[in-house]
Image (cartoon, helix red, strand yellow):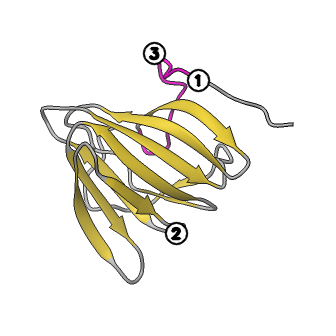
């Protein structure tokens, strides 16, 4: 039997992520989990990498930048509503919000987010403030 899950976006964050963003937990299934991240206007996250998961992010509101790096590739991309991007396993990444607007992002983790210790702080290009 299949269980259905319906969740409204929580008003308050459920947790502060290792990168410093505020996280609201959304539904999950066997193959993945979903969350809503916010980063305050002008804030810069801590750079992190994941131990076991891939992620896909979709920018809902706000503007900013995302740095992603592997041993073979490095880039900074603009974040704005409608932009979707991948964070493959082992990618180092850091993001920051524009000074005039916060960022809101929906992310999907595959497999589902395993809990504390998944994200590991690494060196990034910007000084973290979150």
| Circle nearer the viewer, 3 or 2 | 3
**For discs 1 and 2, the disc positioned in front in the rendered view:** 1
Q: Is residue 73 above or below residue 38?
A: below
The quarter of the picture where the N terminus appears is: top right
Does the CB distance between marks 3 and 2 fall below 8 Å?
Answer: no
Q: Is residue 110 above or below residue 38?
A: below
116 drawn magenta: no
Give the SS element for disc 1.
loop
In the image, is residue 105 above or below residue 119?
above
Residue at left offset 21%, top offset 46%: 64
Q: Quadrant of residue 72?
A: bottom left
Point out the residue furthest to the top here. 11
Mark toward the start of the polypeptide (1 vs 2): 1
Q: Based on the displayed image, in which of its 4 quarters is residue 69 positioned?
A: bottom left
Secondary structure under the numbered disc 3 in the rendered image: loop
Residue at image coords 32%, 37%: 60
Q: Are marks 3 and 1 in contact (CB under 8 Å)?
A: no
Q: Which residue is mark 3?
A: 11
Q: Earlier in the sequence, mark 3 or mark 2?
A: 3
Q: Residue at x 26, y 70 (%)?
A: 75
**Secondary structure predominantly adopted by residues drawn in magenta:** loop
Residue 17 among those drawn in magenta: yes
Q: Which residues are magenta?
A: 8-20
* Alpha-carbon span between mark 1 and mark 2: 30 Å
Asked whether 8 or 3 is in front, the reply is 3
Around disc 2, counting alpha carbons within 10 Å, would you say few (fewer than 14), some (14 to 19), or many (20 or more)? Answer: some
| Percent position of residue 33, x then y | 61, 44
Q: CA distance from mark 3 to mark 1?
A: 12 Å
Residue 20 x/y as whole percent = 41, 39
Q: CA distance from mark 3 to mark 2?
A: 31 Å
Q: Residue under circle 2?
A: 90
Q: Disc 1 designates what residue? A: 7
């Amino acid at each position: 039997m299949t269980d259905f899950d319906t969740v409204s976006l929580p008003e308050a964050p459920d947790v502060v992520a290792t990168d410093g963003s505020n996280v609201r937990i959304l539904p999950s299934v066997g193959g993945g989990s979903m969350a809503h991240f916010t980063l305050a206007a002008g804030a810069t996250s801590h750079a992190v990498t994941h131990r076991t998961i891939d992620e896909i992010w979709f920018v809902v509101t706000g503007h900013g930048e995302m740095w992603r790096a592997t041993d073979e590739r490095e880039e900074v991309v603009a974040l704005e509503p409608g932009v979707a991007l991948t964070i493959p396993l082992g990618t180092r990444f850091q993001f920051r919000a524009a000074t005039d607007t916060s960022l809101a992002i929906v992310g999907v983790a595959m497999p589902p987010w395993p809990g504390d210790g998944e994200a590991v702080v690494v060196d990034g290009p910007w000084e973290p403030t979150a």
